[in-house]
């Protein structure tokens, strides 16, 4: 496939992934998953619990002891009086006293003065008869007596969980602060930093809630009866609210399975205000933009990586994004929803690999086509009608395999042909000359017989060398332990008559080491040594000696053949064991290089190597270095 | 001795006929495997020399046929251009008594023929204490071999193995035969044992053309001791 096309596909995949992510973020498609991660991480950001905050809950116990809700308002007045007597610092009374009753005066009297008592205002959304909202606030008598009124509205996300709280609301031409903001001002004497930071368009803060039940809480009835030690109440900012299950003032908050009472929600908010610890969610546009960064970095990395590496990197990036997002929220309060960024790699990885796979498949297809087109005799395809694309492809692969098998058979046949049919006539020529003693023939004719015989022998040797080399390279080796000195001895025996006839000695003194074994094909090793010795005989000047040696070198066996000839011609020294490295031998005959190529191939087959060196006074030194084979015990 | 030769090549038939006749044998030559088989059913030969690649029946098939159907079956020598060691091993393991790769010199062919014939015409066991083979003298009492004037002590098995080879020069011994005869088929015998004995005999006795002998491995089959002819 053309590189340009691959780049184009790469770009398209990246673009498609980017657009999918951007739209996903904009359409809030990842909210559910993001909420899961947020709810897991947000409690880690919660501020340490402020010991000044105390909840007094209108709990099931209180209902059982004092009576059914609503209670006579005197009970509240009595509680406030008790709290004041105990010396609390601030009272947030999260109970709505809306409709006027006869006991309002008593309540007003109780809450007036110090310590200050703050009461809630609730925006009921939507309001009745099409109004956007209805304001629920204490009746005038009680409201006037209170130090201040604050809003207590909660924002619910689309999964019904409260994560954000409006810290102020615009009503009647002015901003109404939150109930807890009023407490903050009372305690610290100034508006909270969070309040000042909050803009006007959407005045909400994101609160890192503690788990439900974290804040210190007392039962209404206990305090009302005077059962709470005043030391527990003194100096506290007390939040009174309904916590009983029947009263409905319960909410889902992040990080908790249990519902949280309104009073505890206020406690959390006040705690965060005091410590000024909130969560700042990142703008969705920025989230979308950030999600593209890992996607494109990964896309770039895909060019350099293998599929496995790509997969590992993709998984690593996804995990890193998750961990990074959780850490950022826990440590800095910055909330960067990671889901879009995590999803990006998960989208592009399979797409890119699909394209890569397609590219490879196309390449294979093209190559198969080219191969099938080149081959004159393609084996017929088996019937694959009704098969799909995969079956078709498999069938073509079968054709290729059949083609390779056929060529292997043909190669075997060729070797068979060479080893028998080409040898036969040469054998007959030699038999003809061998059978005729030549007695009575003129000297010239006899000499000619000798030359014809030598040529026939050369042809035989060439065919043999070629066939042996081809067999060695095409067949798997049958390796068995071979006594190297024994193989060398057999080779010497085979070459000795020829050497002896032209006055060359073979010194085998150093080659009689027993029990040095190497794994290999014995016949091939003998033949390799014969090749080295024949070369040495041809290269040796008359009257010189060829020295053979077998020795141990650590965990290797060294078998060497050294002559006193001129060494290899310069042209062959660079690669002495190259095939068809033609040389003119001193005898005038031409060498094909097959013999030495065979030597090197045998050495390789044994897991060793063949080396060439020259002695100080000239002469070719060939050495086979083979891994030693040892058997623990060889009994008699 | 009556020897049958089958080869589709006239040159080889003539060469063999001349060679065997010179060696004092009577030779019948066949150019076709079928003719040979017919003759072998009607007639008795002391030895059959077979080419491998012959139309219409190849030599190996004839060998197998003869081993299965003829009783007694004459010894068979394969004489062929197929030089691969796997071919050699296959023919020998199929029952051929010897295998000669073409081309081969007259002397070697004749020596191999004699070796096979000697083996089938049981020769009397020699009784003397000392036996002489070329430059080697075997002393059966002391398991010692004397080369020229040097005494070479051998173990009992080495001596027996060496003597077996020297008594049957040119004969192809299969590993199985040697192991059965000398080791009585000891179970769990390490496969290298025979190789090591051969190797020790070779180096102790300094077997080599210099001393008139050549100990050959027949790869995939066994061993052969050749008397080396100085000529």
Image: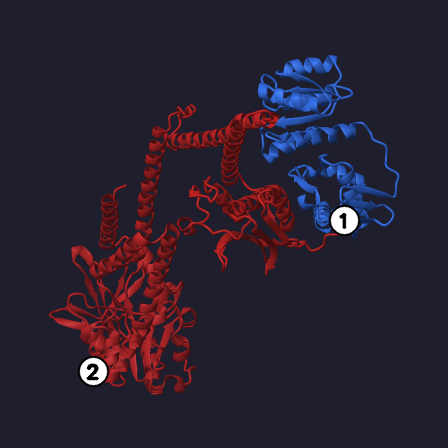
Which residue is disc 1 drawn over? B147
The residue at 47%/52% (across/down) is A567
Any part of residue A269 in sight: yes
Between the C-alphas of marks 1 and 2, the distance is 123 Å
Residue A387 place in picture, x, y as percent: 40, 27
What residue do we see at 86% from left, 50% from top? B142
Task: Tell me which colouring the rendered structure shows.
Answer: by chain
Q: Nearer the viewer, residue B117 or B39?
A: B117
- Relative vertical location of residue A307 with respect to residue B127 in this rendering, above or below: below
Tell me the residue that label 2 is attached to: A190
Up-down relation of residue B105 to residue A268 (above or below): above
B76 or A365, nearer to the observer: B76
Q: Quadrant of the N terminus of chain A?
A: top left
- As drawn, which residue projects farthest toward the left? A173
Q: Which mark is residue A388?
A: none
Assess disc 1: are there few (<14), some (14-19) or many (≥20) residues with their C-alpha within 10 Å of its C-alpha: some
The vertical placement of A595 against B110, above or below, is below
Classify residue A194 by image quadrant. bottom left
A33 horizontally vs A540: left or right: left
Q: Crowdedness of circle 2 by 10 Å Cα count: few (<14), some, many (20+)?
A: few
Q: Nearer the viewer, mark 1 or mark 2?
A: 1
**Chain letter for the red part:** A
Chain of the residue under label 1:
B
Residue B3 at x, y = what percent? 71, 21
SS at mark 2 in the image: loop
Name the tint of chain B in the rendering: blue
- Disc 1 is placed on an element classified as strand
Please say whether residue A253 is visible from this viewpoint: no
Residue A274: image x %, image y %?
28, 79
Task: From the top left corner, tell me how far across and down residue A348 is, in percent.
Answer: 30, 50
- Report the front residue among A164 and A570: A570
Same chain assignment for discs 1 and 2:
no
């Amino acid at each position: 496939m053309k590189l340009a096309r691959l780049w184009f596909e790469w770009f398209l995949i990246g673009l498609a992934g980017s657009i999918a992510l951007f739209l996903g973020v904009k359409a809030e498609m990842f909210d559910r998953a993001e909420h899961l991660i947020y709810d897991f991480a947000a409690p880690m950001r919660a501020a340490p619990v402020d010991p000044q905050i105390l909840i007094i809950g209108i709990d099931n116990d209180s209902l059982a002891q004092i009576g059914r809700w609503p209670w006579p308002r005197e009970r509240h007045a009595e509680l406030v009086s008790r709290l004041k007597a105990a010396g609390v610092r601030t009272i947030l009374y999260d109970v709505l006293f809306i409709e006027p009753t006869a006991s309002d005066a008593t309540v007003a009297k109780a809450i007036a003065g110090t310590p200050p008592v703050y009461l809630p205002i609730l925006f009921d959304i939507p309001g009745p008869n099409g109004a956007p909202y209805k304001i629920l606030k204490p009746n005038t008598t009680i409201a006037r007596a209170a130090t201040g009124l604050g809003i207590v509205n909660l924002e619910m996300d689309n999964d019904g969980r409260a994560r954000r709280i409006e810290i102020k609301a615009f009503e009647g031409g002015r901003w109404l602060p939150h109930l807890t903001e009023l407490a903050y001002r009372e305690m610290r004497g100034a508006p909270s930093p969070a309040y000042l930071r909050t803009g006007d368009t959407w005045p909400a803060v994101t609160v890192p809630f503690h788990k439900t039940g974290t804040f210190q809480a007392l039962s209404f009835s206990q305090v009302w009866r005077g059962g709470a030690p005043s030391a527990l109440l003194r100096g506290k900012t007390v939040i009174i609210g309904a916590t009983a299950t029947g009263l409905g003032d319960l909410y889902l908050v992040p990080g908790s399975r249990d519902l949280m009472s309104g009073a505890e929600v206020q406690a959390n908010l006040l705690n965060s205000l005091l410590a000024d610890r909130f969560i700042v969610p990142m703008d969705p546009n920025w989230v979308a933009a950030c999600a593209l960064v890992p996607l494109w970095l990964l896309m770039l990395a895909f060019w350099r990586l293998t599929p496995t590496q790509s997969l590992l990197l993709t998984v690593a990036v996804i995990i890193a994004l998750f961990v990074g997002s959780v850490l950022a929220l826990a440590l800095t309060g910055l909330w960067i929803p990671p889901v879009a960024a995590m999803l990006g790699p998960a989208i592009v990885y399979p797409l890119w690999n699909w394209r890569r796979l397609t590219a490879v498949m196309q390449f294979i297809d093209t190559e198969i086509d080219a191969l099938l087109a080149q081959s004159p005799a393609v084996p017929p395809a088996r019937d694959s009608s009704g098969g799909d694309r995969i079956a078709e492809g498999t069938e073509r692969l079968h054709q290729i395999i059949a083609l390779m098998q056929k060529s292997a058979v043909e190669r075997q046949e060729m070797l068979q042909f060479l080893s028998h049919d080409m040898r036969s006539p040469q054998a007959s020529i030699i038999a003809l000359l061998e059978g005729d003693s030549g007695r009575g023939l003129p000297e010239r004719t006899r000499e000619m017989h000798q030359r014809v015989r030598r040529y026939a022998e050369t042809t035989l040797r060439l065919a043999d060398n070629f066939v042996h080399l081809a067999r060695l390279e095409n067949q798997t080796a049958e390796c068995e332990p071979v006594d190297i000195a024994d193989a060398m001895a057999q080779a010497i025996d085979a070459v000795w008559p020829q050497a002896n006839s032209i006055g060359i000695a073979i010194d085998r003194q150093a080659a009689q080491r027993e029990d040095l074994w190497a794994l290999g094909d014995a016949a091939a090793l003998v033949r390799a040594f014969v090749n080295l010795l024949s070369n040495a005989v041809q290269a040796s000047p008359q009257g010189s000696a060829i020295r053979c040696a077998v020795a141990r070198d650590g965990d290797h066996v060294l078998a060497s053949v050294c002559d006193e000839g001129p060494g290899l011609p310069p042209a062959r020294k660079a690669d002495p064991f190259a095939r068809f490295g033609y040389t003119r031998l001193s005898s005038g005959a031409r060498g094909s290089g097959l013999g030495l190529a065979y030597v090197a191939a045998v050495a390789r087959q044994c897991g060793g190597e063949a080396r060439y060196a020259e002695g100080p006074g000239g002469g070719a030194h060939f050495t086979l270095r083979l891994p030693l084979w040892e058997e623990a015990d060889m009994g008699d | 001795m009556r020897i049958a030769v089958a080869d589709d090549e006239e040159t080889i038939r003539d060469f063999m006929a001349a060679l065997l006749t010179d060696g004092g044998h009577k030779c019948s030559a066949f150019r076709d495997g079928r003719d040979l088989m017919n003759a072998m059913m009607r007639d008795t030969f002391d030895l059959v020399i077979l080419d491998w690649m012959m139309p219409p029946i190849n030599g190996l098939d004839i060998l197998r046929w003869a081993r299965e159907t003829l009783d007694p079956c004459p010894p068979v020598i394969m004489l062929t251009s197929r030089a691969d060691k796997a071919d050699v091993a296959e023919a020998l393991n199929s029952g051929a008594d010897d295998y000669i790769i073409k081309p081969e010199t007259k002397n070697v062919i004749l020596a191999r023929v004699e070796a096979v014939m000697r083996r089938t015409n049981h020769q009397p066991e020699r009784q003397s204490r000392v036996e002489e083979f070329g430059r080697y003298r075997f002393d059966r009492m002391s398991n010692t071999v004397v080369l020229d004037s040097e005494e070479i002590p051998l173990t009992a098995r080495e001596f027996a193995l060496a003597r077996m080879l020297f008594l049957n020069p040119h004969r192809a011994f299969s590993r199985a035969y040697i192991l059965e005869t000398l080791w009585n088929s000891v179970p769990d015998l390490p496969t290298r044992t025979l190789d090591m004995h051969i190797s020790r005999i070779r180096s102790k006795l300094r077997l080599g053309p210099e001393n008139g002998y050549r100990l050959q491995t027949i790869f995939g089959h066994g061993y052969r001791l050749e008397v080396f002819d100085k000529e």
